[in-house]
């Protein structure tokens, strides 16, 4: 099975453009590309589920607005291929999501999250879309207490600056901690080594 995830860090722009920093490059996303990238952010999605997940999230974000939610499948596939080519989405083959997640993170440079209110609202919508209760979904607006090893790894990653922290070759506890932080939406995958991008 093929699994997909978003690569990069969304950055604020004065002109309102949707920009993502991947490694040292800043890239603009347009139209449906923004929806596809957001659908894959902080998740590992199997190839056959990406389109359905995107449409579902759009319907949650824009209820009763078919002009924003009726995305043609061919347009979606074109945007997904373009994002793959530009390094904004990575693809990895694996039988399980956990195996794919470990493979992605082993080849990744990660950075800590600094979320805006709008990004927290998007996380709230995603959490609700994934079937979480409202009580659990609201947690994106709260700071959660972290275990000691999580705080230590986050401090190390923050200290690595804009270049990101490489998890390459990591095994065991470090990889498990990084995966927990990524699933907890506290890390971005800033870049992935070339052989892991389809």
Image (cartoon, grey):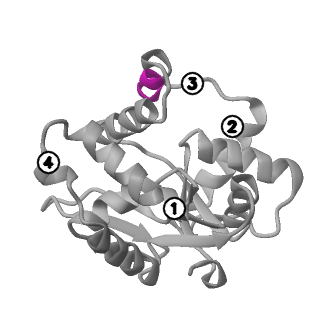
Mark 1 or mark 3: whose residue is earlier in sequence: 1
The N terminus, quarter of image: bottom right
* Lateral position of residue 67 relative to residue 166, left or right: left
Could you classify mark 3 by the number of other residues whose Cα lies within 10 Å: few (under 14), some (14-19), or many (20 or more)? few
Q: Gap between marks 3 and 2, in whole Å? A: 11 Å
Mark 4 or mark 1: whose residue is earlier in sequence: 1
Residue range of the region highlighted in magenta in the rendering: 137-142
Nearer mark to the viewer, of 4 and 2 = 4
Q: Gap between marks 3 and 4, in whole Å? A: 36 Å
Q: Quadrant of residue 75?
A: bottom left
Mark 4 sits on what residue? 66
Q: Secondary structure at mark 4?
A: helix
Mark 1 sits on what residue? 48
CB within 8 Å, label 4 to label 1: no
Nearer mark to the viewer, of 1 and 2 = 1
Mark 1 or mark 2: whose residue is earlier in sequence: 1
Residue 190 percent coordinates (x, y): 52, 65
């Amino acid at each position: 099975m093929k699994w997909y995830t978003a690569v990069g860090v969304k950055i604020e722009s004065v002109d309102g453009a949707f920009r993502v920093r991947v490694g040292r490059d800043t890239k603009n996303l347009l139209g449906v590309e923004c929806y596809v990238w957001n659908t894959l952010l902080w998740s590992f999605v199997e190839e056959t589920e990406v389109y359905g997940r995107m449409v579902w999230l759009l319907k949650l974000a824009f209820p009763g607005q078919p002009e924003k939610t009726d995305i043609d499948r061919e347009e979606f596939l074109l945007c997904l291929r373009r994002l793959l080519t530009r390094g904004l989405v990575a693809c990895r083959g694996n039988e399980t999501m956990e195996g794919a997640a470990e493979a992605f993170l082993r080849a990744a440079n990660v950075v800590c999250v600094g979320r805006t209110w709008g990004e927290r609202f998007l996380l709230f919508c995603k959490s609700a879309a994934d079937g979480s209760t409202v009580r659990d979904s609201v947690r994106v607006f709260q700071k959660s207490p972290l275990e000691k090893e999580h705080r230590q790894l986050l401090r190390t990653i923050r200290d690595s600056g804009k270049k990101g922290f490489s998890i390459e070759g990591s095994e065991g506890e470090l990889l498990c901690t990084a995966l927990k932080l990524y699933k907890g939406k506290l890390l971005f995958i800033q870049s992935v080594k070339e052989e892991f991008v389809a």
